[in-house]
């Protein structure tokens, strides 16, 4: 298997897709999710809201860790307690535990989670919390996980060898509680370059690859040596304006002089950015049609999606008028920052978006970097990029509540609100709406999700562009079920007769 990005094996360190995909091979999450991101039983066999602020988890009996030790409620409590205490974590998983006030171990196979408010999406949040062995991890560091010493889970594979930035080898866990993995051994290699990854597949050196370059999909579908598997993902890609500081070195006038104030703080400027984009053309050209243009926060299958909102055509003239109204009739220079190895065609998308913005009066410089450089640079407290390309996966809630609380809500590190709000957006009124909506249950929840999402987007905290598509290619004889959460997991692969 070839994957695009390096990964670590501490399942509580750096809440990012490549790490989660690697973790799902070795560990179980508290509640599992299937390829369509539906919540399904795993080591937690069933869950129930027994009171408005209490969820009871009933654990599967007879489950063992890779070292043969039994899985019990103590491991669940330990795993939840460990998440907020991993040191120097640039992207903690704590947003998934935001409402949990207390963990009660009722007996070895029953856990109760007491929350500080009603939280109807807690089961989905628990699909991101992986179970580690208390015995193996109690004194372990992230380094101990990445070297393999503490990487002991209950998942379908166990670690045989970790090779750092190059990948890992895993072997089937024959004591796995569920259906056994189809392959006895899987070699997972990191090949960051799209062309190299595809060449390795076609040469037979690799049997299955993720992140197939969109331009090659049609050709591969005609190649008798290869099978192509695709699915619309749960990831919304967006441009994120940075309003955190009042002045940025990478925001200047046409002569290169720093602007006295950050124009992105004006909602009219953010609106101009949005309506300058021809989303359908961007999907067609930069993604070769392998995407779904959108102006919404969530994909069509998820709660909060509003079918009455359609993708408008680009309007560069209106964008120029909004810039003039905001006091920038001649536009200004801004840098658009992007990764070049994290999302599908991310560098091409940025170049295309930059050209569209330039036609609307912005003078755009595009800067691309590898994800391991780009991501730390854009942390909320140190971000110096005026505009960024980002994507957020939404399977943990299957509705708009996750992106609203993570990317729109004012950043509150202590309560894990705004963890994905790297642009510093803050609106007290919207915060109040989000706080109320998160705890809402019953038949009115969907309409409220739509309302809060609509009112939030009017303030343009970020600019949705398209819904990403998962494309996987495999040699004939290998079948793969792509996951909506985009995570490449060896358990989803199986041999088929040729």
Image: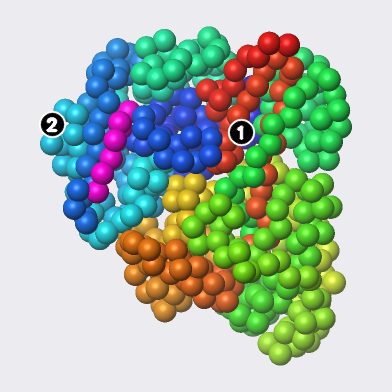
Q: Quadrant of the C terminus?
A: top right
User: For residue 112: magenta?
Assistant: no
Q: Residues within 10 Å of mark 2 (few under 14, many from 20)?
A: few
Residue hosting label 2: 107
Q: Quadrant of residue 203?
A: top right
Magenta portion: prevailing SS class: strand
Between 380 and 218, the one lying in front of the other is 218
Q: CA distance from mark 2 to mark 1?
A: 37 Å
Q: Under tag 1, what secondary structure? A: loop
List x then y, in percent, for residue 25. 48, 25
Query: Height in image: 42 above or below 250?
Result: above
Q: Which mark is residue 482?
A: 1
List x then y, in percent, for residue 392. 56, 52
Range covered by the magenta-colored residues: 43-49
Residue at x-position 62% and y-position 49%? 374
Q: Residues within 10 Å of mark 1 (few under 14, many from 20)?
A: many
């Amino acid at each position: 298997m070839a994957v695009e990005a390096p990964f670590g094996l501490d399942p509580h360190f750096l809440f990012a897709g490549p790490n989660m995909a690697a973790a799902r091979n070795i560990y179980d999450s508290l509640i599992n999710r299937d390829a369509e991101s539906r919540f399904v039983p795993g080591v937690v066999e069933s869950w129930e809201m027994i009171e408005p602020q209490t969820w009871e988890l009933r654990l599967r009996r007879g489950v063992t860790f890779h070292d043969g030790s039994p899985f019990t409620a103590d491991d669940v409590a330990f795993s939840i307690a460990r998440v907020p205490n991993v040191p120097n974590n640039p992207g903690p998983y704590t947003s998934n535990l935001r409402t949990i006030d207390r963990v009660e171990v009722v007996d070895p196979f029953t856990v109760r989670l007491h929350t500080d408010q009603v939280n109807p999406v807690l089961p989905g949040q628990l699909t991101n919390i992986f179970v580690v062995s208390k015995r193996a991890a109690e004194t372990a560091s992230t380094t101990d996980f990445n070297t393999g010493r503490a990487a002991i889970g209950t998942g379908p594979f166990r670690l045989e060898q970790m090779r750092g930035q190059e990948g890992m080898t895993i072997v089937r866990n024959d004591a796995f509680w569920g259906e056994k993995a189809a392959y006895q051994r899987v070699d997972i290699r990191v090949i960051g370059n799209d062309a190299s990854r595809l060449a390795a597949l076609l040469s037979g050196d690799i049997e299955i690859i993720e992140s197939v370059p969109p331009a090659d999909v049609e050709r591969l579908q005609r190649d008798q040596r290869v099978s192509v598997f695709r699915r619309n993902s749960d990831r919304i890609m967006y441009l994120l304006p940075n309003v955190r500081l009042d002045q940025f070195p990478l925001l200047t006038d046409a002569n290169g002089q720093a602007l006295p104030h950050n124009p992105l703080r004006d909602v009219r400027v953010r609106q101009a950015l949005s309506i300058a984009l021809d989303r359908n053309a961007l999907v067609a050209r930069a993604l070769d049609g392998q995407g779904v243009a959108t102006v919404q926060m969530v994909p069509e299958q998820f709660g909060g999606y509003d079918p009455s909102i359609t993708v408008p055509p680009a309007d560069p003239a209106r964008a120029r008028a909004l810039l003039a109204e905001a006091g920038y009739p001649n536009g200004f220079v801004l840098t658009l920052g992007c990764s070049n190895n994290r999302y599908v065609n991310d560098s091409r998308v940025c170049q295309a978006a930059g050209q569209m913005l330039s036609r609307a009066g912005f003078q755009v410089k595009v800067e691309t970097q590898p994800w391991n450089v780009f991501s730390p640079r854009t942390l909320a407290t140190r971000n110096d990029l005026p505009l960024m390309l980002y994507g957020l996966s939404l399977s943990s809630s299957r509705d708009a509540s996750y992106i609203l609380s993570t990317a729109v809500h004012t950043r509150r590190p202590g309560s894990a609100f705004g963890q994905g709000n790297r642009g510093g957006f803050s609106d007290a009124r919207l915060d109040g709406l989000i706080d109320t909506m998160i705890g809402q249950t019953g038949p009115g929840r969907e309409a409220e999700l739509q309302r809060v999402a609509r009112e939030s987007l009017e303030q343009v905290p970020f600019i949705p562009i398209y819904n990403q598509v998962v494309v996987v290619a495999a040699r004939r004889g290998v079948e793969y079920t792509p996951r909506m959460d985009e995570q490449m997991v060896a358990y989803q692969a199986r041999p088929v007769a040729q």
